[in-house]
Amino acid sequence: MLQATPVKLKADSVKLNYYNDRTKRDLSVLDGIDFSVNEGELVSIVGPSGCGKSTFLAAVDGLVSIDGGRILIDEREVTKPGPDRGLVFQQDSLFPWRTVQRNVAYGLEIQKILSKQEIAARARKFVELVGLAGFEDSYPSELSGGMRQRVNIARALAVDPELLLLDEPFAALDAQTREFMQFELLRILDRAQKTGLFITHQIDEAIFLSNRVIVFSARPAKVKEIVEIDLPKERTLDLKHTPRFMEIFRHIWRLIEEESARMGLLRVH
Ligand SMILES: Nc1ncnc2c1ncn2[C@@H]1O[C@H](COP(=O)(O)OP(=O)(O)OP(=O)(O)O)[C@@H](O)[C@H]1O
């Protein structure tokens, strides 16, 4: 009998409000988010601007607490940040005074589990995995934007998280580097055997990277649709020009357009 793939992340009716000090009112941001991510999958979230994507990711990371429902990682409820999650933002958060090697080692150093030699070996392994062998002793200021994001990803992976959370990690990169980094992310996650949850504004990026794309509605966000990406597992650049890719693109575009119009961000004729 075939074994079912274990569920890595489960969002179960997740609700979240922000209290606005000025209006003295609660702002409902997440209104019953339900979906799950299986082990080894990369799932993206897209939706209109301001619908609550980053808030949801912050809740999965345990940085903000939820007001209803549950978020489970490996069936354990998330209550606070932990080493089972690695977060990568749009802006790299590297220490300018640390070399590449020591930036990647940072999370391991504060964990205080491994010896100095083990930390150095592990950091080196992840520097290599993200394609930066030879740059161990460089400082962030000596690297390009794409290289700095690689260091960021290596640092998040080095502590061996169960789930990698990526919030617009390539948004600040030029178009060509961004495309290259998409391939790299797929390669890195595959080699490291990790599960990923990815937020992006770019529909083509979401389709290209993902097993599934979760489309959030306008705020307060609900899951408007879960789009299964039935493209070949091997992702090549040509794929972006196939009729099926474009069909999925148009479908997701329309969903977001409807929701943006509901939010008054866009007029649909
Ligand atoms: N710390 C906060 N306190 C109060 N309101 C907040 C806070 N952070 C975000 N919000 C509000 O919550 C809503 C959702 O914001 P969030 O950043 O999660 O959306 P998003 O979908 O990631 O946006 P974008 O696509 O523009 O990056 C917005 O209306 C925002 O103004």
Image (cartoon, helix red, strand yellow):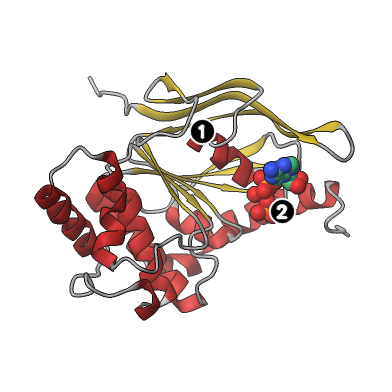
Nearer to us in this view, 210 or 107 = 107
Q: Which mark is residue 49?
A: 2
Describe residue 225's horizontal placement relative to residue 194 as left or right: right
Image location (x, y in percent) of residue 239 = 43, 65
Residue located at (38% from left, 42% from top) = 41
Quadrant of the image containing the N terminus? top left
Report crowding for label 2: few under 14, some 14 to 19, many 20 or more residues within 10 A (C-alpha). Answer: some
Earlier residue among tags 2 and 1 = 2
State the residue at coordinates (32%, 65%).
98
- Residue 162: quadrant of the picture: top left
When the figure is inspected, residue 249 is found, relative to residue 30, above or below; the finding is below
Give how far across and how far down residue 139 sits, in percent. Answer: 32, 73
Cβ of disc 2 within 8 Å of ligand 1? yes
Q: Which dot marks residue 62?
A: 1
Query: Which mark is drawn over residue 208?
Result: none
Can residue 185 be spotted in the picture? yes
